[in-house]
Image (cartoon, rainbow, N blue to C red):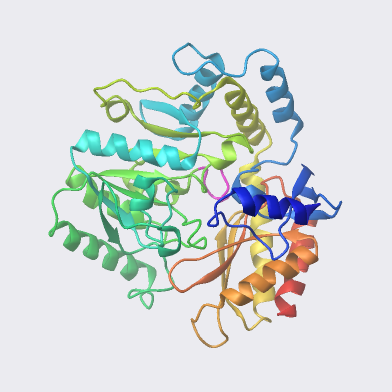
Amino acid sequence: MTRDLFGRHRAVLPDWLALYYEDPLEITHGEGRRVWDAAGNAYLDFFGGILTTMTAHALPEVTKAVSEQAGRIIHSSTLYLNRPMVELAERVAQVSAIPDARVFFTTSGTEANDTALLLATAHRRSNTILAMRNSYHGRSFSSVGITGNRGWSPTSLSPLQTLYVHGGVRTRGPYAHLDDRDFIDACVEDLEDLLGHTRPPAALIAEPVQGVGGFTSGPDGLYAAFREVLHERGILWIADEVQTGWGRTGEHFWGWQAHGRSGPPDIVTFAKGIGNGMSVGGVIARAEIMNCLDANSISTFGGTQVTMAAGLANLTYLLEHDLQGNARRVGGLLIERLRAVAARVPHVREVRGRGLMIGVELARPGTDEAVPEVAAAVLEEARAGGLLIGKGGGHSTSVLRIAPPMSLTVAEAEEGAAILERALRSV
């Protein structure tokens, strides 16, 4: 049945629509941190639909909220008052740490980043954007234009002029040999030099932890130092929190808070985990920025009642059950367990991460050379052992991406680490 579905998939869907595994997997249902395929095989899910199943599969609170709302009304658009949208916006604004915050809902992280770019360029009257090397911000025309990852950039055409800044990857590049303080100083000096060669940009957009790029990040305080340079020139800071938001990094509720010394970002984008699988994205910005548009705008599907009900129930559950604290505790144990494994596996170059956002970078032993074939083989072996993980990486890197639902237990973390250890050793 799966082979038949694969054939049908290939006959009607684009060739560039990526699928994991030589024998692609059809997931039919899930519960908690586990999913099952069409053949009845169970898997521990350490990728959560690309960091989207944030709390748990089939979380009763979310399922109930969706069912009850669907029984009343599913959709009306933003042309009408929408109680669930207002209620979720109030909660998001409250936890955003942005003063006088306004919230606009979209259907995805890509659309959220599109909206942030629209706001920034309109507010600043500039189409120049600063972005980070190795970054990923979505698959739309404008978000591809600011993505600094060649593997996810199918065109060089763009409505924006994009300039790329150093700092998103700590252990590679021209500043990798420096200590953290000197690394930050070098990146700031590079940014200041870059700004001397261009017209005033609208904004810097940055993921506090780069997701598709392999869960890489600069040292804590990097974007705070950037923020000081930007603020002097009126340049906005957009924090892309599509993967880092809602406490996944453990230490902080938002990834930008590791860089909060100079104040919050001007704009924050979010998506993925807030809907726990429902299609929810959004933008948070100060009122003066959010309200800068001088033409009509709506969102047909952003903020629709059923997705807002899911988001509100999911956020409430996350806060009431301190899943940020769980990500910090269980994620810390999992990272240390994987570092102990890595010490015995020559192909592992680095284990890095924060909370339940962990990257295992693979390289040819004794070198920094990427080994994508090994990453693919580990993915297959992990699946055979009953574990689903992701992969990623940017320029010449190959990384295993680990991001389980944030309700992961210590026992499940140990189980997953043991399966991954066997997979790593097998190749």
Give the dominant element type of the magenta stretch: helix, strand or loop.
loop
Q: Give x and y (percent) for residue 124.
A: 20, 38
- Is residue 205 among the parts visible in the rendering? yes
Residue under the point 46% across and 18% down: 78
Q: Which region is colored magenta?
A: 246-253
Residue under the point 51% across and 39% down: 271
View extreme (front): residue: 11
381 versus 319 height, above or below? below
- Is residue 246 among the parts visible in the rendering? no
306 versus 115 height, above or below? above
Left or right: 99 as drawn, with respect to 198 = right
Of residues 24 and 195, the one nearer the viewer is 24
Residue 66 position by quadrant? top right
Left or right: 304 as drawn, with respect to 20 = left
Q: Give x and y (percent) for residue 56.
A: 71, 41
Magenta segment: does it hold 224? Answer: no
Residue 403 position by quadrant? bottom right
Left or right: 281 as drawn, with respect to 317 = left
Residue under the point 37% across and 35% down: 115
Residue under the point 78% across and 43% down: 30
Q: Give x and y (percent) for residue 424.
A: 70, 75
219 versus 243 height, above or below? below
Residue 426 position by quadrant? bottom right
Magenta segment: does it hold 252? Answer: yes
Of residues 234 and 80, the one nearer the viewer is 80
The number of numbered discs placed on residues in the rendered structure image is 0
Assign the C terminus to one quadrant of the image: bottom right
Of residues 356 and 125, the one nearer the viewer is 125
View extreme (right): residue: 40
Q: Give x and y (percent) for residue 53.
A: 65, 43
